[in-house]
Image: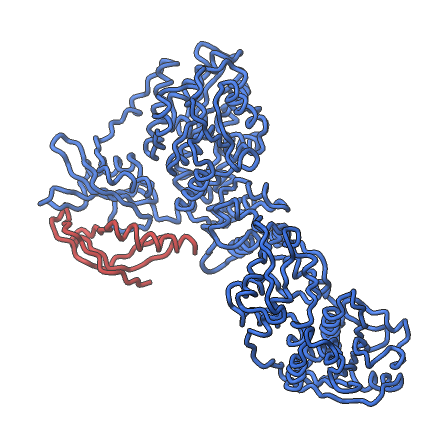
Chain colours: A blue, B red
């Protein structure tokens, strides 16, 4: 992954941009942070936040006019947040340490005037360790002392001057200024700042011509050499915040001049202006502003009440909708950096592997993000690179890939023409999961298609290859796609009817030459196989892979309409539907998070579900939500209640149902019986009831148990507890070692008491499974080891 | 690499072939090119090693994941 890809993604996610109150503040005070701290009662921290950006805080905090109020999003709700109130509260109630200066430098600069801008510049420059001389006509801070005490209490000016003296600012009172005096000053010092906001000074008295006052907005440089200025501002232009900002910016320029750096380079971010942050504050009811008894001295309760009015502007829209993005406790821009670092890691632990593999790649974030940032395609690219660099943890997708290869093996996969026909115009492709969950319904659909469509319908049972693509393995993906292409060509290039939305995405990406339609757009135009709508309203759930497939979204609704089935659309549906957690093999790599995806979707609907993707239906059922597949309505095989509650088949059951679907249809429609070797007898097993969920979690199949038992029956188990009549056998048929604890029954059957697995290689375990790097070679180099 | 594990008990298992009770001894286990010497119960005669479920699904799984992320 190159840096450009990262930058491109980062530039889309605006979460790290400042909120408008901060971006429009000439000083960039972090108002959102400050309000949060005051609201949490952390007043000392709030004061620190203020002091980070506010020059000469004892004055600035009192005099800030709050330009942020014009840009506060709260103002459209009721009234803008009163940040100056919070600033005054921080100054009064927050503790502060005496200001610290950096080690002394040999550089000298002169400041003229003792108005707010000059004192702000003095505060900034003395803290940098420079030797600063402040020349003031009349007593220092005289113009500030002239302000009404309700605007600025006299003790605030005392405190400010005390702090500047502690910072070793040298005060020089001058009786009179003149043009010649300023010229000499500019020769004596490396840089000179004049704060014309001090009414004791004027441009004329210093010999400054109108052209000398044409300043650079950011650097405050005058066309006259080494001279920086602050100009007086009328009351309408917020003179105080402008003076503070001018003093601060000029000080930054002076500091650069003293250090031999150009004053104007890379300072664009200092300008006040609009932010890129797309803020979506929570809509909430109006909250009237706090009205303190004494606005100059708000109590902690009054300040807290005002601070809690802050809308805490953030984007985070995607996090509100996606359980995955919330799970890692940050936001996409940060995740992208973590993923980039993960990919670039040469030595050490790759901490983001699980994050990369837990994204469902469902595309919801891209729909929600105002700038279209797509975490899914970013993770997909990361997976490709992890596989290419042989850093993809083999356990993340191994089971899904084995399951795919099982579905594509000659034992399961088949393609047949409609019985009695030698040519077909259509080819029904039910996918690997529909027959693994509802084999009878898949068979009924095929019969319905055969009777309803002209030109002959073939049946092609196989896995499309989506797991290979999701797992980031292009060569394996290409091989599966090539197998499908070859079979389709041999069948005379029929139009393919797909029952699964993920298959359709796969075909469009990998097999664009094959013309496909979804089952639903075909069924919409055929006679409805069922007449009976159910009285209960069902929540219609769209699969994430169909979010951009308008024809399918509309076809399903047309079918339901014709059937007269009442449905409701959950809060997020159609283009904005949520994933059940199966997408992107998220639940394979991270089962715990996979369950959260399903639970979240179940909570959206809150009523019996109607899905038309079998994995959505089964996963939401497993998450506790009763639900139907659309085929349950169209081809009912049981009562409505029984269909709603039908459990999601386990992993072994899915394999068995695929076998049954194949054998059943081949026998019934084509009169084929399975060849002898397919009938290899399995040892009769009974599995302890309480063990079944654990076998599912550990992805131990019934066929794995049978292989261990079969081996033990031939060669004897490894260990025994003779007094209890129990045995322990182990086998490593591939890169996993299985252990099975069992009893032998007098009738020759086996009772499975316990089973477990590990990947580490332990000496002495029989079997052909090599050490694990071979597995990496297998799947990562995509040799297709299974 | 030497790894300390809490002592693994043989839990009453004996070797089916040699009829010997299992004894704890150092065994080399490997994963993803890394080898570890650990004390595990096994048959003193034929050398078969016993991996109990708590170990396979606990510490062993943890180390497997760690090595996969390395």
Residue A4 visible, this angle: no
Residue appearing at x 86%, y 76% in the figure = A224
**Is residue A666 shown left or right of residue A136?**
left
Figure label count: 0
* Residue furthest to the top: A420
Indicate whether B26 appears above or below A120: above
* Residue furthest to the left: A723
Residue appearing at x 55%, y 61% in the figure = A305
**Is residue A80 shown left or right of residue A211?**
left
Quadrant in the picture for residue A290? bottom right
Whole-percent x, y for residue A333 in the image: 57, 53
Quadrant including the C terminus of chain A: top left
**Is residue A353 shown left or right of residue A692?**
right
Residue appearing at x 74%, y 74% in the figure = A247
Of residues A9 and A25, the one nearer the viewer is: A25
Indicate whether A697 appears above or below A18: above
Whole-percent x, y for residue A609 in the image: 44, 31
Of residues A8 and A251, the one nearer the viewer is: A251
Whole-percent x, y for residue A89 in the image: 59, 70
């Amino acid at each position: 992954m190159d840096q450009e890809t990262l930058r491109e993604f980062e530039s889309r996610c605006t979460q790290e941009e400042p909120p408008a109150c901060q971006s429009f503040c000439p000083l960039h005070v972090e108002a959102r942070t400050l309000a949060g701290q005051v609201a949490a009662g952390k007043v000392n921290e709030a004061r620190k936040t203020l002091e980070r950006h506010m020059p000469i805080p004892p004055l600035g905090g009192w005099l800030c006019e709050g330009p942020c109020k014009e840009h506060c999003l709260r103002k459209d709700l009721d009234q803008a947040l009163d940040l100056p109130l919070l600033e005054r509260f921080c100054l009064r109630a927050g503790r502060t340490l005496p200001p610290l200066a950096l080690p002394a430098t040999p550089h000298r600069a002169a400041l003229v005037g003792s108005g707010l801008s000059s004192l702000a510049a003095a505060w900034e420059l003395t803290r940098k360790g420079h030797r600063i001389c402040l020349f003031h006509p009349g007593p220092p801070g005289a113009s500030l002392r002239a302000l009404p005490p309700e605007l600025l209490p006299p003790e605030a000016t005392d405190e400010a001057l005390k702090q500047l003296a502690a910072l070793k600012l040298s005060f020089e009172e001058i009786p009179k200024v003149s043009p010649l005096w300023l010229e000499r000053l500019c020769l004596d010092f490396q840089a000179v700042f004049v704060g014309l906001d001090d009414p004791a000074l004027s441009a004329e008295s210093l010999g400054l011509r109108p052209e000398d006052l044409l300043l650079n907005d950011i650097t405050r440089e005058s066309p006259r050499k080494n001279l920086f200025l602050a100009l007086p501002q009328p009351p309408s232009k917020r003179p105080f915040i402008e003076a503070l900002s001018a003093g601060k910016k000029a000080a930054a320029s002076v500091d650069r001049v003293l250090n031999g750096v150009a004053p104007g380079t890379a300072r664009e971010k200092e300008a006040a202006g609009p932010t890129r942050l797309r803020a979506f504050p929570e809509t909430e009811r109006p909250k009237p502003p706090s009205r303190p008894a004494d606005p100059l001295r708000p109590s902690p309760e009054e300040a807290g009440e005002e601070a809690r009015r802050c809308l805490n502007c953030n984007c985070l829209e995607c996090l509100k909708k996606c359980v995955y993005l919330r799970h890692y406790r940050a936001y996409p821009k940060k995740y992208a950096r973590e993923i980039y670092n993960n990919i670039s890691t040469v030595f050490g632990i790759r901490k983001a592997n699980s994050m990369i593999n837990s994204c469902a790649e469902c595309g919801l974030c891209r729909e929600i993000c105002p700038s279209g940032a797509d975490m899914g395609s970013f993770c997909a690219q990361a997976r490709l690179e992890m596989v290419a660099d042989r850093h993809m943890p083999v356990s993340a997708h191994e089971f899904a890939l084995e399951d795919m290869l099982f579905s594509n093996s000659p034992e399961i996969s088949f393609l047949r023409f409609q019985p009695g026909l030698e040519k077909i115009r259509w080819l029904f492709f039910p996918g690997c999961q529909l027959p693994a969950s509802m084999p009878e319904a898949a068979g009924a659909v095929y019969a319905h298609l055969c009777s309803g469509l002209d030109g002959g319908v073939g049946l092609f049972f196989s896995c499309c290859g989506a797991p290979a693509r999701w797992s980031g393995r292009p060569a394996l993906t290409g091989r599966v796609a090539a197998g499908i292409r070859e079979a389709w060509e041999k069948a005379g290039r029929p139009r393919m009817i797909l029952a699964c939305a993920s298959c359709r995405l796969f075909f469009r990406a990998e097999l664009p030459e094959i013309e496909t339609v979804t089952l639903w757009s075909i069924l919409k135009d055929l006679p409805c196989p069922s007449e009976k709508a159910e009285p209960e309203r069902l929540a219609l759930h769209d699969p994430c892979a169909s979010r951009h497939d308008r024809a399918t979204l509309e076809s399903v609704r047309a079918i339901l309409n014709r059937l007269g089935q009442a449905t409701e659309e959950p809060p997020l549906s159609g283009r904005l539907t949520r994933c059940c957690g199966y997408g992107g093999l998220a639940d394979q790599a991270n089962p715990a998070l996979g369950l959260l995806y399903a639970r979240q979707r179940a909570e959206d609907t809150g009523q019996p579900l109607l899905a038309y993707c079998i994995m959505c239906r089964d996963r939401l059922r497993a998450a506790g939500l009763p639900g139907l597949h659309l085929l349950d309505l169209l081809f009912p095989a049981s009562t409505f209640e029984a269909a709603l509650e039908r459990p999601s088949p386990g992993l072994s059951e899915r394999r068995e149902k695929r076998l049954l679907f194949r054998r059943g249809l081949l026998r019934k429609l084509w009169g084929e019986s399975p060849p002898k070797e397919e009938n290899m007898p399995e040892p009769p097993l009974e599995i302890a009831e309480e063990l079944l969920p654990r076998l599912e979690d550990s992805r131990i199949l019934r066929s794995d148990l049978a292989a261990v038992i079969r081996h033990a029956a031939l060669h004897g188990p490894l260990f025994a507890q003779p007094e209890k009549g129990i045995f322990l056998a182990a086998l490593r048929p591939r890169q996993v070692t299985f252990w099975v604890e069992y009893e032998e029954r007098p009738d020759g059957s086996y009772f499975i008491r316990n089973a477990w697995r590990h990947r580490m290689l332990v000496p002495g375990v029989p079997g052909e499974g090599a050490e694990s790097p071979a597995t990496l070679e297998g799947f990562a180099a995509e040799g297709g080891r299974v | 690499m030497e790894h300390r594990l809490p002592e693994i008990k043989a839990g009453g298992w004996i070797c089916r072939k040699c009829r010997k009770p299992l004894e704890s001894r150092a065994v080399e286990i490997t994963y993803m090119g890394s080898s570890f010497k650990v004390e595990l119960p096994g048959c003193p005669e034929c050398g078969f090693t016993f991996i109990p479920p708590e170990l396979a699904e606990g510490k062993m799984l943890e180390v497997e994941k760690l090595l996969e992320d390395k």
